[in-house]
Amino acid sequence: MSIEFSPSARRVVTEGRVARLATADRAGRPLVVPICYAFDGQHCYSVIDKKPKRASGERLRRVQNIRENPNVSLLIDHYEEDWARLSYVIIEGHAEILSGGHEFSAGIDLLLGKYLQYQKMPLDRQAGIMIKMTPHRVIEWRATPVGGFE
């Protein structure tokens, strides 16, 4: 089942540079982390890259949480000092961990196309840890054109 995105929500998700990924373990303890991501029109992808982290890939809480509880939420927001231009999209969905294969490689290609920084960082196209999120619900909010808020 594919979720429909409004044109404005699709624009926020496609153009967004950073998102906040919310996960929870099986006991419901939440974790929110900023991530880089790419959107292919149906799924969001985020790779566990080589930037310094507190733990190695499989031991990261977000990865462990997804393995225990695949329900996730992704927030992509747009902020400006002019609050009449604020907006956000929340994607609620199901996450899974990819470790290789065609879809993993395609996700790497999407990320390489979006982020110049990834082009300078060694990303293995064959294997690693990637989060794939399948949307189940999309919530969109934006300030109204007259300066109010919806």
Image (cartoon, grey):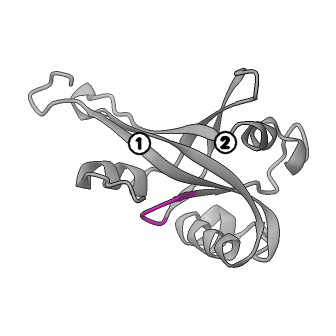
Q: What's the distance in space between the residues labelled 1 and 2, CA to CA? A: 14 Å
Magenta run includes residue 134 = no
Lower sequence index among marks 1 and 2: 2
Identify the secondary structure beneath mark 1.
strand
| Left or right of 39 on screen, residue 149 | left
Q: Which residue is mark 2?
A: 70
| Residue 133, horizontal then vertical, whole percent | 58, 52
Are there few (<14), some (14-19), or many (20+) residues within 10 Å of tag 2? many
Q: What secondary structure prevails in the magenta region?
A: loop
Task: Looking at the picture, tell me which residue is in the foreground, 63 or 119.
Answer: 63
The answer to which image quadrant residue 115 occupies is bottom right
Quadrant including the N terminus: bottom left
Task: Looking at the picture, tell me which residue is in the foreground, 144 or 96.
Answer: 96
Query: Would you place residue 80 above or below residue 63 in this image?
Result: above
| Residue 27, horizontal then vertical, whole percent | 76, 21
| Residue 90, horizontal then vertical, whole percent | 43, 37
Query: In the image, which residues are magenta?
Result: 40-44
